Image (cartoon, rainbow, N blue to C red):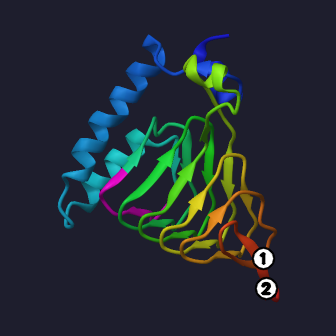
Amino acid sequence: MTEKEKMLAGMLYTAFGEELNAEYVGAKKLLKIYNATDEDECEKRARLLDELFGSVGKDCAVKPPFQCDYGKNITLGDRVFINYDCVILDVCKVTIGNNVLIGPRVCITAAAHPLDKDTRISGLEYGAPVTICDNVWLGAGVIINPGVTIGENSVIGSGSVVTRDVPANSVAVGVPCRVIKTLEKA
C-alpha cells in the first residue's frame, strides 16, 4: 500500500513522503489564492472550492480564512455554510451533509497521533473519518475529534469538544461534549 492508501484507510502512515507532500503543497497553493479573494469574488471562490474539495454541493459558502490539509478528502452537501477561521484536518474522509451551519473557529480533525510515545516519535500518524449529517449546526469554536459522527438535525454548543458520536436530533454541549436535550422530530 502507498502511504496515501494507508492514510485514507486509517492505518499508521508517514505523512512526509513525495505523494502526500505534493498533494499537501497543491492544497496550500489553492488555499493561499482562496484566502486572498475578496467578498465579491463568489464565482472565483466557487471554482477554487470545486478544485480543492472532493465534491461541493449547490449554494455552499466558505468564509476565508479557511485551512485544510489536502482538501480532496472533504465533501460538502448542498447549502453548507462554513464561517471564518475553520480548520479541517482531512487525512481521512470528512463528509459534511446538506444544510450544515459551521460557526467561526471550528476545528474538524480526522488526524490523530499514536498514544505510544515510541510510535509517535517515529513520525507515524493515523486518522479516522468524520461525518456531519444533514441539518447540523456547529456553534463557534467547536472541536470535533477523529472518528466522530454527528447525527442529523443535531446542534453542538459553542466551545464544545466532541470526542464521541452524537445521536440524531440532539443538543450536545461541553468538554467533553454530552447530550443535554433530545429535539422533537418535525
User: In the rendered image, which quarter is residue 134 located in?
Assistant: bottom right
* Magenta segment: 57-66
Q: Secondary structure at mark 2?
A: strand
The amino acid on which the numbered mark 2 sits, given as a three-letter code, is Lys
Give percent across and percent down for residue 30. Answer: 30, 39
| Farthest residue, direction front | 117
Chief secondary structure of the magenta portion: loop
Let me know if residue 62 is in the magenta part.
yes
Residue identified by numbered label 1: 179
Give percent across and percent down for residue 1. Answer: 68, 10
Query: CB of mark 2 within 8 Å of CB of mark 1?
Result: yes
Q: Relative to 58, is 26 on the left or the right? A: left
Residue identified by numbered label 2: 181
Let me know if residue 56 is in the magenta part.
no
What residue is shown at x 54% (from left), y 40% (from top)?
90
Q: Relative to 143, is 67 on the left or the right? A: left
What residue is shown at x 57% (from left), y 21% (from top)?
121
Give percent across and percent down for residue 86. Answer: 42, 58
What residue is shown at x 78% (from left), y 88% (from top)?
186
Q: Relative to 134, is 30 on the left or the right? A: left
The residue lying toward the viewer, choosing from 43 and 73, is: 73
